[in-house]
């Protein structure tokens, strides 16, 4: 009798051992603040991992937008569409390869899966814009923080459907290349003028910064008194400031390209940032200081507190950003 009792106790012990399966009552990834993407160029599959759990968000390329604001997407009602939310539990440690691999490893195995079948995906995006390295009051956008929340989401799970009014997925960060405003090597500090169009500018191979329809009253061949530059504001019709970048692999920015009446097909302009309209004594101010050397007047152009905007994003050039010098001969 004692022998049978010992065998029964041993069997109960075996059944009580942890076989690696994870029992799930609720999804909790609150301690995992940031998420990752399988491919940061598309952001089509974003995930968060715990030792034996994964929370997946699948969306079409372009759903993550690098611009301030909020976007709303609807979770597919069958859990198989373009916008999917999936939770998985595993019988062992899960890694990136289990989520992103073309042929996922055979272990660990999925022991439980919940599919989102209703609700919305809310993505609120905010730019990351630290001060630039020049310590001149300027900023540069280095990335975007995307805060993702599921609202009124319903999970279809083995034990039955479960709905949550608010489920915070967390944040997903994207990186962008900060605006490059280093002009071509120019020991004279010159800016340039176009002959065919009313434009002054400075540039490098990948970008140019221009002022279109600049106020002609700024370029009087007359020396300005000390600390009394001529000033004019950015308006809808005058002193229009643009920062334009070339798409990689489509060619280099050149003076011929910048000054063409009709924009050539190459290089391709990837981004256009526009100067915000000026406010007197505050922002969006164009300053010109004039000096004379021999029979040549030098007009130094400075952009004061100019803010460049694209969509809902913006950055500040600096409190006093030098575009360069325009030289004009003295007239008799």
Image: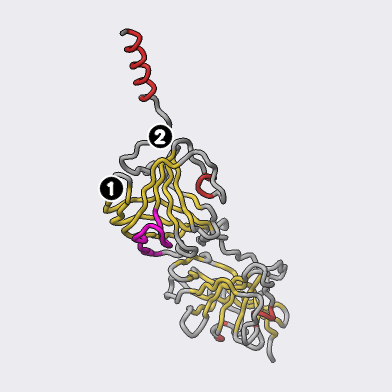
The image quadrant of residue 71 is bottom left
Q: Which of marks 2 and 1 is nearer the N terminus?
A: 2
- Residue at 64 percent across and 76 percent down: it is 291
| Label 2 secondary element | loop
Does residue 38 appear anywhere in the picture? Answer: yes
Q: In this view, does 273 lie above or below 143?
A: below
Give residue 21's mark: 2
Closer to the camera in the image, 108 or 317: 108
Farthest residue, direction top: 2
Q: Where is residue 10 in the image (x, y as percent from the top left)?
A: 37, 17
The color scheme shown is: secondary structure
Q: Could you tell whether 122 is left or right of 252 in the image?
A: left
The image quadrant of residue 195 is bottom right
Q: How crowded is mark 1: few (under 14 residues within 10 Å), some or many (20 or more)?
A: few
- What is the span of residues highlighted in magenta in the rendered image? 69-85
List the residue tagged with mark 1. 160
Q: Could you tell whether 332 is left or right of 229 in the image?
A: right
Is 83 covered by the magenta stretch? yes
Closer to the camera in the image, 137 or 195: 195
Q: Position of residue 46 (x, y in %)?
A: 47, 53
Q: Where is residue 72 in the image (x, y as percent from the top left)?
A: 36, 64
| Label 1 secondary element | strand
**From the image, which quarter does the N terminus lie in?**
top left
- Residue at 31 percent across and 58 percent down: it is 118
Q: Position of residue 227 (x, y in %)?
A: 54, 71
Q: Could you tell whether 43 is left or right of 162 in the image?
A: right
Q: Residues within 10 Å of mark 2 (few under 14, many from 20)?
A: some
- Residue at 46 percent across and 81 percent down: it is 235
Closer to the camera in the image, 207 or 200: 207
Q: In this view, does 240 lie above or below 85?
A: below
Label 2 – label 1 distance at C-alpha:
19 Å
């Amino acid at each position: 009798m004692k022998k049978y009792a010992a065998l029964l106790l041993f069997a109960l012990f075996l059944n009580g051992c942890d076989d690696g399966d994870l029992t799930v009552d609720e999804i909790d990834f609150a301690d995992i603040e940031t998420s990752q993407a399988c491919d940061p160029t598309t952001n089509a599959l974003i995930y968060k991992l715990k030792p034996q759990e994964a929370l997946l968000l699948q969306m079409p390329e372009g759903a993550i937008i690098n611009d301030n604001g909020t976007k709303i997407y609807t979770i597919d009602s069958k859990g198989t569409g373009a916008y999917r939310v999936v939770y998985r539990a595993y019988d062992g440690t899960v890694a990136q390869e289990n989520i992103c691999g073309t042929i996922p490893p055979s272990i660990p195995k999925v022991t439980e899966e919940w599919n989102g079948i209703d609700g919305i995906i809310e993505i609120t995006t905010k730019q990351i814009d630290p001060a630039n390295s020049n310590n001149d009051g300027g900023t540069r956008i280095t990335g975007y923080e995307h805060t993702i929340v599921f609202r009124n989401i319903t999970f279809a799970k083995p034990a039955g459907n479960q709905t949550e009014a608010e489920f915070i997925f967390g944040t997903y960060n994207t990186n962008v290349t900060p605006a490059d405003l280093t002009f071509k090597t120019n020991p004279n500090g010159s800016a340039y003028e176009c002959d065919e169009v009313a434009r002054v500018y400075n540039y490098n191979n990948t970008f140019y910064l221009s002022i279109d329809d600049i106020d002609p009253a700024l370029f009087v061949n007359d020396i300005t008194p000390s600390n009394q530059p001529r000033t004019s504001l950015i308006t809808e019709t005058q002193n229009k400031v643009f920062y334009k970048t070339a798409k990689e692999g489509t060619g280099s920015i050149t003076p011929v390209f910048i000054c063409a009446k009709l924009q050539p097909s190459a290089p391709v302009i990837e981004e256009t940032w526009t100067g915000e309209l000026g406010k007197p004594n505050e922002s969006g101010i164009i300053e010109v200081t004039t000096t004379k050397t021999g029979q040549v007047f030098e007009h130094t152009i400075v952009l004061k507190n100019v803010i460049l905007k694209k969509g809902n994003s913006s950055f500040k050039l600096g409190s006093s950003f030098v575009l360069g010098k325009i030289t004009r001969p003295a007239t008799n």
